């Protein structure tokens, strides 16, 4: 049983990473910003940047930008291919999936896209660029990184963090050689990153998941999901976590890459209700319901991941640019009604206020 710790005290997690406070900024695939990542690292925590969809060149540029913004440790985050991805679909299926989305392309004045040669960058290229960039930490979701990836990271002095939505996933990650495990409860915003069982069968809440993971593994445990203030931090540490990973509360700050309309919504009563849906990406994720999700749930035709993510990704950024919250993704966790702060420094101060 892990002793209850003060969040300001150094512990085995802060010592592992040579950081001041046991707070991790959750990575945001598609919505990470250099400014927010650097702000959390400069504040003594671990800023993370989500590299979903980035090719080698974009990863190298992002790492250089992060280094220019902070000399402190930061994490880069990748999605592990776990065999559940659909690499390609026949042209007739692509046309059928596109047709369902045509009204949204039309509404935004965009043409339907042609079928691409691939839907995601090559994982090997992403890993190579990420490890070459030499972050303090590389964190993974959706699987256990291959032994050679973990070995190469360690050879370069990079710590490896894996993400679990169940005790079995945490045990598998520890067996795979990771240095710490994120235990992500179903309250979390964004994708459910399950890989051993379907996400729908891995919906454990943070309060139940964290102590079970802490009992099952010997590496440090990072609690994620529903933590947005000093009470959440105290609870997570009491449950046996060594650190917390916070997404939604940081996503709603000025330094975030979320557009103002999205940030405003996170601070509004609308964020009190979130749903788990496969409609936007083909994988289960938590966000604020909008007209797009309602329309696609009703249509009932959703391409498999990553095809659906790629297709809706051809118009969601345009909707975001226009501040059109009807047609963009609004990933958010269940903690949104707790949000009171508008800068990364304020959120960090709130999280650490119980110290
Ligand atoms: C917009 C958004 C995108 C996210 N993308 C990723 C991602 O690419 N990789 C990842 O490990 N976690 C991702 N997450 C999860 C967060 O990093 C974090 O674990 C989670 O938000 C914590 O729960 P909370 O939202 O209740 O604070 C995402 C979350 C959000 C809200």
Image (tube, rainbow, N blue to C red):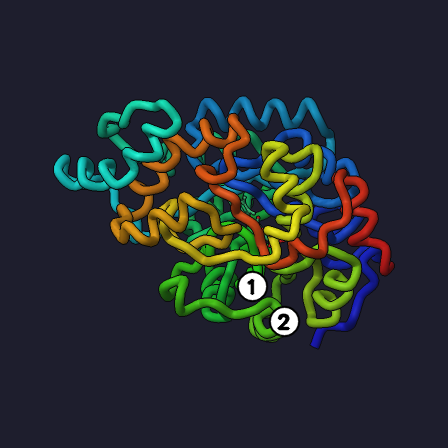
The image shows residue 310, relative to residue 214, as above or below, that is above
Q: Nearer the viewer, residue 233 or 65?
A: 233
In percent of the image, x 57 and y 70: which residue is there?
A: 209
Q: Residue at x 47, y 38 (%)?
A: 328
Does 171 sit left or right of 299 as displayed?
right
Residue at 64%, 39% in the rendered image? 263
Q: Are marks 1 and 2 in contact (CB under 8 Å)?
A: yes
The secondary structure type at the circle numbered 1 is: loop
Is disc 2 surrounded by few (<14), some (14 to 19) or many (20+) residues within 10 Å? some
- Residue 207, label in figure: 2
What residue is disc 1 on? 185
Give percent across and percent down for residue 313: 39, 34
Residue 137, image x, y percentages: 60, 43
Residue 319 spot, x, y in % from top left: 46, 31
On residue 68, which mark appears? none
Q: Position of residue 124 (x, y in %)?
A: 37, 36
Mark 1 Cα within 10 Å, few/some/many (few <14, many 20+)?
Answer: many
State which tag comes first along the sequence, 1 or 2.
1
From what the image shows, is residue 241 above or below residue 96?
below
For residue 280, above or below residue 133: below
Residue at left offset 51%, top offset 38%: 325
The quadrant in which the N terminus is found is bottom right
Q: Nearer the viewer, residue 157 or 137?
A: 137
């Amino acid at each position: 049983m892990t002793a209850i710790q003060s969040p300001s005290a150094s512990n085995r997690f802060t010592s592992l990473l040579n950081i001041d406070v046991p707070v991790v900024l959750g990575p945001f695939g598609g919505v990470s910003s250099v400014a927010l990542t650097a702000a959390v690292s400069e504040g003594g925590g671990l800023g993370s940047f989500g590299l979903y969809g980035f090719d080698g060149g974009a990863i190298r540029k992002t790492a250089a930008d992060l280094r220019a913004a902070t000399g402190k440790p930061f994490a880069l985050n990748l999605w592990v291919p776990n065999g559940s991805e659909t690499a390609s679909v026949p042209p007739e299926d692509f046309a059928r999936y596109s047709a369902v989305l045509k009204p949204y392309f039309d509404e935004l004045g965009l043409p339907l896209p042609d079928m691409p040669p691939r839907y995601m960058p090559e994982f090997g290229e992403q890993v190579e660029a990420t490890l070459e960039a030499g972050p303090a930490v590389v964190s993974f979701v959706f699987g256990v990184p291959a032994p050679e990836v973990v070995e190469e990271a360690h050879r370069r002095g990079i710590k490896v963090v894996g993400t679990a939505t169940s005790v079995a996933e945490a045990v598998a990650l520890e067996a795979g050689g990771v240095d710490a495990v994120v235990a992500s409860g179903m309250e979390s915003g964004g994708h459910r990153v399950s890989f051993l069982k379907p996400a729908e069968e891995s919906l454990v809440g943070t309060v139940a998941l964290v102590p079970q993971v802490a009992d099952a593994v010997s590496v440090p445990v990072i609690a994620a999901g529903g933590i947005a203030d000093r009470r959440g931090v105290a609870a997570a540490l009491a449950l046996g976590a060594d650190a917390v990973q916070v997404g939604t509360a940081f996503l709603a700050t000025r330094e975030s890459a979320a557009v103002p309309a999205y940030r405003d919504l996170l601070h509004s009563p609308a964020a009190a209700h979130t749903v788990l849906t496969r409609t936007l990406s083909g994988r289960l994720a938590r966000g604020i319901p909008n007209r797009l999700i309602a329309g696609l749930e009703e249509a009932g035709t959703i391409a498999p991941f990553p095809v659906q993510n790629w297709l809706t990704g051809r118009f969601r950024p345009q909707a975001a640019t226009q501040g059109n919250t009807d047609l963009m993704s609004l990933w958010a966790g269940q903690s949104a009604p707790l949000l009171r702060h508008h800068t990364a420094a304020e959120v960090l101060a709130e999280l650490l206020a119980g110290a």
